[in-house]
Image (tube, helix red, strand yellow):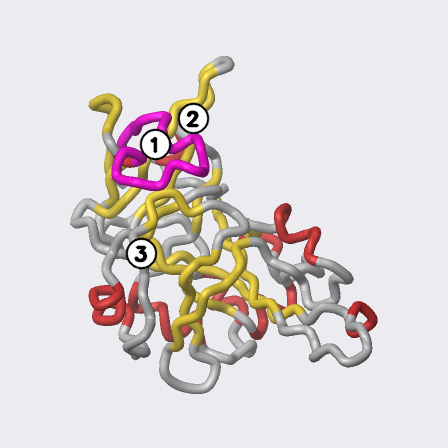
C-alpha cells in the first residue's frame, strides 16, 4: 500500500519536470509527511495541457451519498480496477498523476514497525498513477436560499505487487509511472485499457527507470502531526536499490 509520502520539490522545479503552467499566486510548502485526507498535488490533462489541481486524498465515488468512504479508499489495487464499481469509471475516464518525491512504508517485526523512506537516488520528483473523482454533495442537504454545494475533487493512489527490493518491506507498492507514459496515462481515451493496465506493473528493469533508494528512517514520521526534515533522517545503514 501507500499511506504516506513526501513532496519537498519546489513548485518551479515541478513545473519544469512535469511540463505544466502555473499561476503566479500558487504556493507549495515543503511536505515531509503527507497523509490520507490531506490535499495532494495532482495533474490532469483531459483535453489539452497538463493542469495542476489540489485534491482530497481518499476517493469519494461520484455516486456516494456522503464522503465517509474516502478514508478507506486511499489506494486502489491495479489488478481489479476494471471491475471494482468504485474505480471502474475513473479508470476509464479520470486518470491523474500524483506528484511525489518519496514515500514511506513500514516493515513489521513482531510488535514493532520500522519506517522506510523510498526515493529516487538523484532526489528528483516522480509521478504516482492515480484516479480522481468529482463528487457533488446531495442537493437535499442545501437549505433554501443557500448556494449550491461545491464539488469535491478526490483522488486515490494505484498500487501494484511490490518488486524484489520493496517486497522485503511490504507486499504492495504504489505504481510509479515512467515519464514516457505520462501523456498516455492522462489522455481522455478508454479504447486501450489493456495497454493502460500494462503500465501498472512494478518497476523491475533499471534500464527503464532511474534507481530508487530504500532507507530506514526515524520513527518520528509515525506521528502525522510531525512534518519536517526529521521525518526522513536515516536511523540505520539499511539501504537498497530497485
Is residue 15 one of those drawn in magenta? no
Element under disc 3: loop
* Image mark for residue 107: 2
Disc 2, SS: strand
Q: How far apart are the two marked residues, 2 and 1, measured between alpha carbons? A: 8 Å
Tell me the magenta residue range. Answer: 215-231
State the residue at coordinates (32%, 78%).
Answer: 23
The answer to which of marks 2 and 3 sits earlier in the sequence is: 3
Which of the labelled discs sits on residue 29, or is there none? 3
Image quadrant containing the C terminus: top left
Q: How far across and how far down the image is residue 121, in percent?
A: 19, 45
Residue 116: mark: 1
Picture quadrant where residue 65 is located: bottom right
Residue at image point 54% right, 51% down: 37
Single out the mark in the foreground, 2 or 3. 3
**Between residues 112 and 206, which one lies in front from this camera angle?**
112
Position in image of residue 157 (x %, y %): 49, 54
109 in relation to 14, above or below: above
Q: CA distance from mark 1 to mark 3?
A: 23 Å
Residues at marks 2 and 3, CA–CA distance in whole angstroms? 29 Å
Crowding around mark 3 (Cα neighbors within 10 Å: few <14, some 14 to 19, many 20+) is few
Which residue is painted at 45% across and 37% down in the image? 224
Give percent across and percent down for residue 115: 38, 29
Sequence-earlier tag: 1 or 3: 3
Looking at the image, residue 192 lies above or below residue 55: below
Q: Position of residue 178 (x, y in %)?
A: 32, 61
Amino acid at each position: 500500500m501507500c499511506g504516506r509520502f513526501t513532496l519537498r520539490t519546489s513548485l518551479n522545479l515541478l513545473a519544469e519536470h512535469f511540463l505544466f503552467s502555473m499561476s503566479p499566486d500558487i504556493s507549495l510548502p515543503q511536505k515531509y509527511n503527507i497523509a490520507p485526507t490531506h490535499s495532494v498535488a495532482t495533474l490532469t490533462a483531459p483535453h489539452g495541457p497538463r493542469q495542476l489541481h489540489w485534491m482530497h486524498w481518499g476517493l469519494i465515488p461520484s455516486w456516494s451519498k456522503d464522503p465517509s468512504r474516502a478514508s478507506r479508499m486511499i489506494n486502489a489495487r491495479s489488478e481489479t480496477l476494471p471491475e471494482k464499481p468504485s474505480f471502474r469509471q475513473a479508470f476509464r475516464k479520470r486518470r491523474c498523476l500524483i506528484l511525489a518525491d518519496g514515500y514511506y512504508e513500514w516493515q513489521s517485526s513482531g510488535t514493532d514497525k520500522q519506517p522506510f523512506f523510498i526515493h529516487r537516488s538523484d532526489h528528483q520528483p516522480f509521478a504516482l498513477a492515480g484516479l480522481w473523482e468529482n463528487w457533488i454533495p446531495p442537493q437535499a442537504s442545501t437549505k433554501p436560499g443557500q448556494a449550491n454545494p461545491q464539488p469535491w475533487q478526490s483522488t486515490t493512489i494505484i498500487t501494484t505487487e511490490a518488486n524484489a527490493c520493496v517486497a522485503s518491506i511490504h507486499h504492495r507498492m504504489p505504481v510509479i509511472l515512467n515519464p514516457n507514459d505520462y501523456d498516455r496515462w492522462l489522455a481522455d481515451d478508454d479504447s486501450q485499457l489493456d495497454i493502460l493496465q500494462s503500465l501498472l506493473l512494478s518497476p523491475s528493469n533499471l534500464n527503464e527507470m532511474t534507481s530508487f533508494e530504500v532507507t530506514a528512517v526515524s520513527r518520528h514520521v509515525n506521528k502525522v502531526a510531525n512534518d519536517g526534515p526529521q521525518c526522513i533522517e536515516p536511523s540505520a545503514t539499511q539501504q537498497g536499490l530497485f
